[in-house]
Image (cartoon, grey):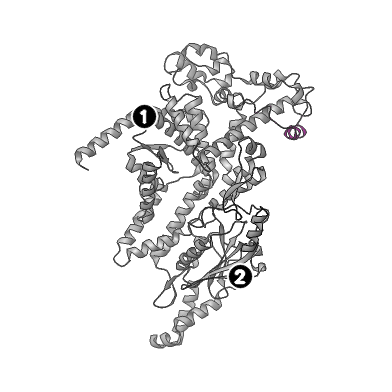
């Protein structure tokens, strides 16, 4: 690029940044008014090519040298060129967070991105699962991921540039490490080194060396008599019969502590080189850093979509000339095909808000004299209740001409200081009406149950839910009328509950708690499966229980099978035994075999994997076809083994794998891949 073009590019980006200064500032102010507490965010303007590079790098400007980034960059470019996919933004979990805005976006798109980013940053800052990486609560965490990833990039680049280290070997070693990047214990606080009980090879080596020195033997005699095979045998006898004592889910940590590399010339395992263990450490640290984002994809994207919509639509952060552009943008995001985390998350957060607000109203109504859970639906006029819950006109329509009306509203809804500034012309109430309100006032202004799309939600409560609320209601307040009861409604209850949920849940616990029969039925979710009889996919069930199981399995352990170390001294031969914690979903045996070849390179000795498979013979399939039903598979135990030369697959007795099987699972769910 010529200097002239470079200067023009810089000036163009500076001009865009200048235009976005006010939206960035006011989006942060609005987010904070709404109760969000985001990390500081630094915004960067990038062009189309730079955006694709950042997406390929996982949102960071510097990553270690590796072919995977080129593949991801190429995929992203093709998606943009041929798939119609447009990258609007990318933001990383850091303190401060860094967000990248594509310069070709319209102003409406940029505003949408900025509000979306502020909500993401709030989630990073407050969700406890992000605090596991730093070992602190999320709101206390000092994340500096960009610096960590840059250090890793620099260190690996130095290893690749070292004349004593083969560059291809470094890249191949990274490939081996990445085969286990999802095999960590993402539910524990990250530590650089885990204290795993097992053999201390260093101490064994030192003891042997000391004993040999005491004998006064020459190096030649030591080499002939006390050869490597003998030393390995002695070491093997020192190893505990079974370690670790409990299955170790952090496979990366285990191979980092006890793994070796296989020396083809010597035909045996030898100690890893320092650079190899260092790279293992780096890959494991990065796996733990990205784990929280994988664990909260639905929550996080739904959270950002919810607050983006609240700011852009409900608070009209999108100007009148930008609104249609924004509506089109949001519709495309939420309408993306397949299991869309934006759409599912957005709908679930609205459900959390609505169910909380509904319960709050119902608890008030059930305290009215003469109203009980048995007769509430018959004696309460829900249309009248909704009319009472509508925000006052003074809150609903705020402009410079109606500011005096706000003075009559309850004290907790109005920011009196800001109201005076608006009266004096210091605040543009027409453009930023939210500035004159408090958090409680905004909650009242945007109360969910009276929105057009949710107006039937209050009356849709079923009798069982009413009974649950009524039976466990503390009789700490009674009302003489419906009007008196509704005057006590906490209009911020829904938002307050959302903030509590945002702090403590991950996708699995979020879905487990809020993916209810009511939600599934109202949103028309269903399951589908592959038929062995027909060879095609078909709708299997629309039952809430089935849908919930499918989705929970999809998000458990990042949607990947759970693999744990069961023995680091299998067969008393220093072999590694892994176990697939089977939940009814079979492994892709072909991929599993290839993965074991990778793990062998990190262990240096034979690697074994116990799993359970479902087998159906051709006769059963033919019978099932004639009877228009699915064949009944038989579950069997299998042991896959790779010794450095060949992969074997053999049957094992059921009692050897029974401990791996989970109960009460959906046996038809198929994750996309294993250890990709």
Q: Are marks 2 and 1 in contact (CB under 8 Å)?
A: no
Where's residue 172, x and y in %?
Answer: 39, 63
Q: Is residue 136 visible?
A: no
Determine the residue positioned at 63% across, 59% down: 621
**Residue 464 drawn in magenta:** yes
78 vs 578: above or below:
above
Range covered by the magenta-colored residues: 457-475
Q: Which numbered disc covers residue 347?
A: none
224 vs 328: above or below:
below
According to the image, label 2 marks what residue? 651
Could you tell which of marks 2 and 1 lies nearer the N-terminus?
1
According to the image, label 1 marks what residue? 21
Q: Is residue 336 visible?
A: yes
Give left or right: position of 93 versus 127: left
Where's residue 33, x and y in %?
Answer: 50, 28
**Residue 65 drawn in magenta:** no
Distance Cα–Cα, label 2 vs label 1? 65 Å
């Amino acid at each position: 690029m010529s200097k002239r073009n470079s200067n023009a590019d810089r000036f163009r980006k500076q001009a865009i940044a200048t235009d976005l200064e006010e939206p960035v500032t006011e989006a942060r102010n609005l987010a904070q008014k709404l109760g969000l507490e985001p990390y500081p965010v630094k915004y960067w303007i990038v062009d189309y090519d730079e955006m694709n590079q950042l997406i390929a790098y996982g949102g960071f400007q510097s990553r270690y040298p590796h072919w995977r980034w080129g593949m991801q960059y190429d995929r992203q470019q093709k998606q943009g060129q041929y798939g119609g996919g447009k990258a609007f933004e990318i933001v990383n979990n850091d303190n401060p967070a860094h967000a990248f805005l594509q310069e070709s976006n319209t102003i409406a798109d940029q505003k949408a991105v900025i509000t979306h980013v502020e909500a993401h940053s709030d989630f990073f800052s407050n969700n406890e699962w992000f605090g596991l990486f730093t070992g602190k609560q999320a709101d206390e965490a000092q994340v500096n991921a960009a610096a960590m990833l840059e250090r890793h990039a620099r260190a690996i680049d130095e290893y690749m540039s070292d004349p004593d280290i083969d560059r291809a070997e470094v890249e191949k070693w990274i490939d081996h490490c990445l085969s286990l990047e999802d095999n960590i214990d993402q539910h524990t606080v990250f530590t650089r080194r885990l204290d795993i009980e097992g053999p201390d090879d260093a101490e064994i080596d030192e003891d042997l060396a000391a004993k040999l020195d005491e004998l006064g033997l020459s190096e030649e005699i030591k080499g002939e008599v006390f050869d490597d095979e003998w030393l390995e045998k002695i070491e093997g006898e020192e190893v505990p019969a079974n370690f670790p004592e409990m299955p170790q889910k952090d496979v990366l940590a285990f191979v980092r502590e006890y793994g070796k590399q296989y020396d083809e010339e010597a035909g045996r395992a030898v100690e890893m080189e320092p650079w190899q263990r260092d790279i293992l450490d780096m890959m494991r640290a990065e796996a733990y850093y990205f784990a929280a984002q994988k664990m909260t994809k639905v929550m996080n994207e739904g959270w950002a979509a919810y607050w983006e919509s609240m700011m852009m639509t409900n608070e009209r952060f999108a100007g009148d000339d930008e609104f249609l552009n924004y509506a089109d943008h949001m519709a495309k995001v939420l309408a993306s095909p397949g299991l869309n985390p934006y759409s599912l998350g957005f709908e679930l957060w609205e459900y959390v808000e609505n169910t909380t607000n509904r319960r709050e109203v119902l608890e008030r109504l059930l305290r009215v004299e003469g109203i009980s859970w048995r007769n509430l639906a018959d004696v309460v006029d829900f249309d009248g209740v909704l009319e009472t819950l509508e925000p006052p006109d003074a809150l609903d329509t705020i402009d410079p001409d109606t500011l005096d009306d706000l003075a009559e509203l309850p004290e907790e809804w109005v920011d009196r200081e800001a109201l005076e500034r608006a009266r004096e012309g210091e605040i543009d109430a027409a453009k930023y009406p939210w500035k004159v309100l408090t958090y409680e006032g905004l909650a009242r202004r945007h109360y969910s149950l009276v929105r057009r799309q949710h107006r039937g939600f209050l009356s849709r409560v079923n009798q069982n839910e009413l009974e649950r609320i009524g039976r466990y209601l503390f009789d700490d307040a009674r009302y003489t009328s419906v009007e008196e009861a509704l005057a006590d409604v906490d209009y911020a209850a829904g938002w307050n509950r959302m903030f509590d949920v945002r702090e403590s849940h991950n996708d699995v616990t979020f879905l487990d708690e809020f993916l209810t029969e009511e939600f599934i039925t109202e949103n028309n979710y269903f399951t589908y499966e592959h038929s062995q009889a027909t060879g095609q996919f078909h709708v299997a069930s629309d039952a809430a229980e089935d849908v919930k199981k499918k989705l929970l399995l999809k998000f458990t352990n990042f949607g990947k099978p759970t693999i744990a170390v069961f023995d680091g001294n299998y067969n008393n031969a220093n072999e590694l035994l892994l176990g697939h914690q089977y939940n009814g979903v079979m492994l892709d045996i072909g991929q599993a075999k290839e993965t074991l070849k990778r793990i062998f390179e990190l262990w240096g000795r034979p690697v074994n994997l116990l799993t359970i498979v479902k087998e159906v013979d051709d006769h059963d399939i033919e019978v099932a076809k004639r009877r228009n039903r699915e064949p009944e598979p038989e579950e069997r135990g299998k042991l896959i083994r790779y010794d450095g030369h060949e992969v074997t697959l053999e049957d094992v007795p059921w009692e050897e794998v029974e401990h791996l099987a989970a109960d009460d699972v959906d046996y038809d769910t198929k994750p996309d891949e294993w250890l990709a």
